[in-house]
Image (spheres, helix red, strand yellow):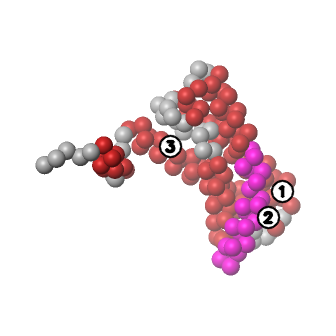
Amino acid sequence: MTEPTQPEQQEQEQEQEPEQQSPPVKKRLLRDRKVHLTAAAAGFIIASAVAFMGGTPVAWGTPVYFVLGWPLMCAVIYFLARAYPHNNWRWTLSMMLGQVFSSIFFGNANFILQAMLFVTLLSIPQFVAGAFGARAGKARQAQHGNPEHSTGNDDTSSQDKL
């Protein structure tokens, strides 16, 4: 039997089950799941609380969303992106999904397309907050002598533990 060539070996490694992945990759995936869950839960809880306080089925139907909800969600995204700056746009997407689920859960399932459109447009400030948070996080990591981590290549840093 012949030994596999270089491309075949790489293909076999890519087909490995998630349980067989190297420890740093598995650790990063578990960490990312926790951050995604944190962002989605924050979006769901904040949007639900704002909708409840405003007495409307959707959060953006009340001024409380813009006065209280937006700043809270931007702050959550800023701190998540500051702590985990690599591909920080993912945290905002998870928060957007939390808001969409809130509008479906407390509103009406007929609101799903409207919810996706409105939440996408209304999440632009969260993307901006995430970009500023990631910039601050990368600068902080570079200042502490860990510049390669700011690109997301080193997954062993104690700063990435949630």
Between discs 1 and 2, the one toward the N terminus: 2
Between discs 3 and 1, the one toward the N terminus: 3
Q: Secondary structure at mark 1?
A: helix
142 shown above or below 89: above
Q: At label 1, which amino acid type do we have?
A: Phe
| Quarter the C terminus occupies | top right
Q: At label 3, which amino acid type do we have?
A: Arg
Write down the quadrant of residue 78 in the picture: top right
Q: CA distance from mark 1 to mark 2?
A: 7 Å
Boundaries of the magenta span: 108-129
Q: CA distance from mark 3 to mark 2?
A: 30 Å
Pick the front one: 39 or 81: 81
Asked if residue 126 lies in the magenta stretch, the reply is yes
Question: Residue 60's mark?
Answer: 2
96 shown above or below 2: below
Residue wearing tag 1 = 66
Between discs 3 and 2, the one toward the N terminus: 3
Q: Is the Cβ of the residue at disc 3 closer than 8 Å to that at disc 1? A: no
129 shown above or below 160: below
